[in-house]
Image (spheres, rainbow, N blue to C red):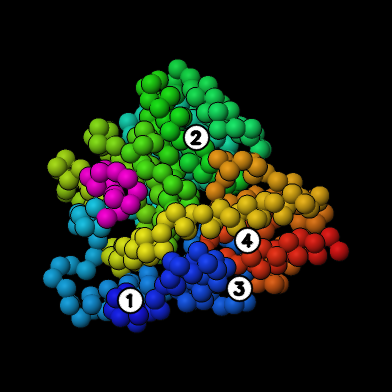
Amino acid sequence: MNRRALLTGLAALPSAALAETDPEMYWRRIREEQFSLPHWRVFLNNGSLGITPKPVVAAMKAFIDRSAALDIEEYPRWGYERMDEHRKALAAFVGCDPDELALTHNATEAISLVAQGLDLKTGDEVLMTDQEHPSGRGAWTVRAARHGIVVRQVPIPLPPKSPEQLAELMVGAIGPRTRVLCFSGITTTTGLIMPVREICRAARAKGVLTLVDGAHMHGQIPFRIDEMDCDFMAASPHKWLFAPAGCGFLYIRREHQDRVFPSITTDGWVNSSLAAARFMLVGTNNRSIFEGMMAGLQFAKDIGPERIMKRMHQLARMVRDRAAKEPSLRILTPDDDRLFGCMVTLQLQPEHAKRFAALVKERRMWTLAAERFRVSAHIHTRPGDIDALFQAVADSKA
């Protein structure tokens, strides 16, 4: 038994050798030993809320127990603290300077901090795609209603032809009043991977700020923030990075930190030496979620981020290839490995959608079930879960 198992009493991870010699057994053991999912649960909606592994739950419980016993030499909270150790570990994983990271509750809050904090005037324009999550639009539409800014959407083809087409569409839509480009690095609607670096660099050359909704990026595809050339990035590690619900983060490029006014504040907001930590001064909050986030990062590193991403994409490719053989389904996710990671969106014929949604619920399957339905797999997803999904598709036509 390894040191991790001795310290926590949890099962050790299967050996890396098993992952090479019998990968299906390796991933089966990961699900059975590292997650609390019952065998009957078919979970295909990781893009909404990920499943918390046992080591993450254990880390949160341990911190709560220590806090209750005051077996700790600092306040067991966040909201007034810099959390330097946490931000340093997170920054090393996502690829940026720790002073450019602020811990938040989720990507929604992170986007709102920027949208509400920037000094925008009546008539200033914010540009986004027509595939944004409601949280990616909401804060800007508040500014539109309150301060008269203009929010304009760029239509994205379903599916698009190439990353180059996407970059051309977004950059070509920038106009004389455009001040901010806010778009998802991976869209929540179709799992489309946007060419973030190319868009952000072109926008920078035009003097336009970029805010990337990275809720689906971290843990789903390999990249470093400092190579994206964006000005801001919001994230929700509870989706793909094994973190518990309620923790997120915001990347703020150092040169723009003084351009954003905090929305929730304590006295320290004026202290520029705190850098991005100024945007974390939101009052007393539950720190156990960030202890869970640290455990989630370690869990990902122990398995290996590349191994995780390869497996998730393998499952998504399995879904897409299977759907291509089903004439009743329209595939909205491109057949280009550069353009999708772990999420595939399919469209049923309208007359089958209601029956499909009923079957999914009846069979205790979790996916976004409607006429358009999104399948988002993670390492706990079994090939049999995908079989069960397509059986529901077939039965919905019976």
Percent position (x, y) of residue 100? 26, 43
**Mark with earlier residue (2, 1):** 1
Q: Which quadrant of the figure has residue 318?
A: bottom right
Quadrant location, the C terminus: bottom right
Residue tagged 2 = 195
Dot 1 alpha-carbon crowd within 10 angstroms: few under 14, some 14 to 19, many 20 or more: few
Question: Is 91 included in the stretch rendered in magenta?
Answer: yes
Q: Earlier in the sequence, mark 1 or mark 3?
A: 1
Between disc 1 and disc 4, whose residue precedes? 1
Q: CA distance from mark 2 to mark 1?
A: 41 Å
Kindly identify the amino acid type of the residue bearing the numbered disc 2: Pro
* Residue labelled with disc 4: 367
| Side of 200 relative to 370 (left or right) | left
Q: Residue at x 49, y 69 (%)?
A: 18
Q: Residues within 10 Å of mark 4 (few under 14, many from 20)?
A: many
Segment tinted magenta in the rendering: 89-103
